Image (cartoon, helix red, strand yellow):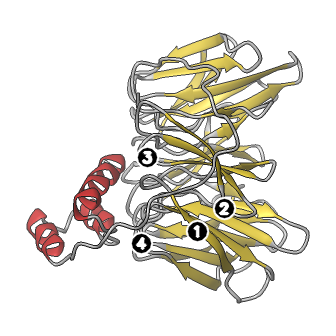
Amino acid sequence: TSMQAVQLVTSIQDQFSVGILNLIGMLLDKTVSLKDVATYLDDVRCGSNEPTLESTLKIEVAIKFRFNMGKCIDTTPTIFKSVNRNRTIVAVGSHSHRVIVLDLDSDELVSELVLPDRVESAVSFLAEAECGLVGCYDGLLYCFDFWTGAICWKFDSGGMIKCKALVADSRILFGSYAEDHNLFALDLSGSLIWRLPIGNKGILSSPISLSNGTAFVATLDGSYSSFATADGTIQWTGKLESPVFATSVFVARSEVILLAEVRGLLHCFSCLDGSKLWQISVNGNIFSTPTVISQSDHVEVVFGCHDKHLYCYSWKDCASHEPPQLKWKLRLQSPIYAGPVVTNNVIVACSTAGYVNMISLTNAQLIGMIKLEGEVFSTPVIGSLDVAYVGCRD
């Protein structure tokens, strides 16, 4: 699977002490033999380790609460505020087949759902119905009441579902690993409206909403498309040289899409016609979903890389073909798979070795840190009162 390929790449890169850009694509390509992979690795020269991270910690970080779900939690927790009940909840799934809903104020279990297979998909919410949507390795998208855990309906896509469903324009849009069709649109009651094949591999990256009734998605073979949410009509499409793991980002102020390609490239495309405005390159694979912070006169783009660095780029003219400039980069303890999040000018960034880091957006200073008891592939989510929720492989 894609996650096993990431783990294998991480282990091999640790042994070689150097990033190996093309390895993930080779492992996911069924036409590449193990002999070809071994030959490629023989040609890779070992590099030297960079200096270790040094800084003065200013924020004390402590575990407020934890819930044992039985197996690894690779998915991102999601938060929903119920206006009707005046309660805020967080939902998350696990490889133990369980999906739990917790009350953010009391940390008490609200409901639990046990599915037939692993859950790597983040939960989406149908606000009016107060239901959750979650994909499963069994190929089904489940709609459940998050107060009781009861299943409202389910839809069989025919392949593993790992991405988060997008609710937009009265549609539920999601990708799967199905061979015939990998992009689906349902109505809010779970009935199929349309389905499409995008590329020839599964979809791990979650669809994102654009403007004017359009959305965007990218696949594990590097294909990407903008499409109409109403009927699935393709607006424009393209193909990259390596897979896309990270979810893309829509920058509304300039009507562009930021797309992270595994082989270390961050692309910027126009939403209008898909034309490429620019690309930037880093020295490692990118699995981390970028975070965009809008300032008064510029935009900052922050993302993690498998070369162990967290990157921050400053982008002054969002509508031009001029690429953003590197503001800073900070080496963390291990490769970064999870996407960073920002709150109150502080970045929360997790490295795979289990570290949760608090970093100043302004000057890249590490100001807080805690090490969890397992690996972290889950992107954190920020709750109230400066509390972050994150899944762990412990």
Q: Earlier in the sequence, mark 2 or mark 3?
A: 3
Q: Which residue position is annotated with label 2?
A: 364
> Looking at the picture, which amino acid does disc 2 mark?
Ala
Task: Say few, some or many: other residues with alpha carbon within 10 Å of mark 2 (under 14 / 14 to 19 / 20 or more).
Answer: many
Give residue 257's quadrant in the image: bottom right
Q: Secondary structure at mark 4?
A: loop
* In this rendering, position of residue 206 left or right of residue 126: left
Q: CA distance from mark 1 to mark 4?
A: 18 Å
Q: Secondary structure at mark 1?
A: strand
Q: Which residue position is annotated with label 3?
A: 352
Q: Earlier in the sequence, mark 4 or mark 3?
A: 4
Q: Which residue position is annotated with label 1?
A: 329
> Looking at the picture, which amino acid does disc 3 mark?
Thr
> In the image, which disc is placed on residue 263?
4
Foreground: disc 2 or disc 4: 2
Q: CA distance from mark 2 to mark 3?
A: 19 Å
Q: Secondary structure at mark 3?
A: loop
